[in-house]
Amino acid sequence: MSDHLRDKYVAVTGASGGIGREIALKAAERGAHLILLARSEERLKQLRQEIITRYRVEAYVYKLDVGDLPQVEKVFTRVLSEVGRIDILVNNAGFGVFKDAHETDLEEARTMFDVNVLGLAACTKMVLPHMKVRKSGHIINIASQAGKIASPKSSIYSATKHAVLGYTNSLRLELADDRIFVTSVNPGPIATNFFAIADESGTYVKNVQRFMLKPDFVAEKVVNSMLTKKREINLPGWMNLGSIFFSLFPKTFERVGKKFIFKK
């Protein structure tokens, strides 16, 4: 197992559960020190204790709602003061709600953009000056296949993930001369508690259960990419082929693939 992460400082937003938690554990296993950020401080403290006990690395806990931009600035200022540096930032925090466009609550939509897009950009903005000074670092943004192939009942969620991909691709070009890596992670559905909010009826989970990715599998791919030039992680591979087909032949995809994407 590679030890290139040993003694690096990895910050993970949304670290209290799902793939954020798995990413933190797998990075710690490689010898990285963790900066754990999420709204649930109690769950972060439990994860911190598990990391310290199992892997004998440092782990720091900071309560953070990434949708609260003043709080992002305050917390990251504190992190950089107390910890000293962040080598890798994993922007994992996010949520979705699956509803028809005409049923979408606009305040809910605003919150989705605040968390999924503006919060991600705010966290990134806080670490970039320090990475640029050191001429090293890695920004990993957890996007979604929904950012490549929009589907019914996810208009706002898909819009936020399209925005994340646009932001990430622009950022990669901006930072190329600073030797800062930028990676987007575009998974299909993952078996996490994400769907407790996104899919209250359980219809989507029931329809795609056999296709769902395991959180530890996704996390392993993310941690393997850390401090490498990996541009994108697209999972599963067959779903990414669909996004390529969609970009080349959108009209045909929408006609032929209609049955598949109507899963919500």
Image (tube, rainbow, N blue to C red):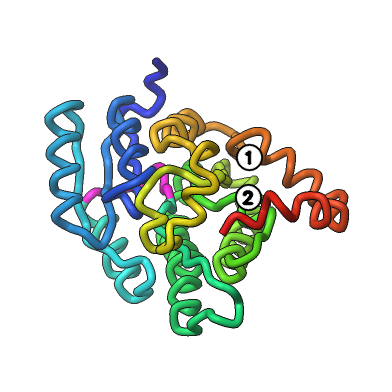
Q: Is residue 222 left or right of residue 179?
A: left
Residue 81 appears anywhere in the view? yes
Queried whether the magenta region covers residue 226, the answer comes back as: no
Q: Is residue 181 above or below residue 13?
A: above
Instruction: Give how far across and how far down residue 165 sits, in percent.
Output: 62, 56
Of 145 and 229, the residue lying toward us = 145
Classify 101 as above or below 130.
below
Q: Position of residue 151 (x, y in %)?
A: 65, 60
Q: Which region is colored magenta?
A: 83-90
Residue in the picture at 74% in, 55% down:
258
Magenta-drawn stretch, dominant element (helix, strand or loop): loop
Q: Residue at x 58, y 46 (%)?
A: 186
Inspect this view and state whether residue 132 appears. no
Q: Quadrant of residue 71?
A: bottom left
CB within 8 Å, label 1 to label 2: yes
Count of marks, rendered view: 2
Q: Nearer the viewer, mark 1 or mark 2?
A: 1
Separation of marks 1 and 2 at Cα, in angstroms: 8 Å
Q: Which residue is mark 1?
A: 231
Label 2 belongs to which residue? 172
Q: Is residue 56 left or right of residue 262?
A: left
What's the residue at 29%, 34% (across, down)? 25
Check disc 2 and give the amino acid type: Arg
Residue type indicated by callout 1? Arg
Q: Secondary structure at mark 2?
A: helix
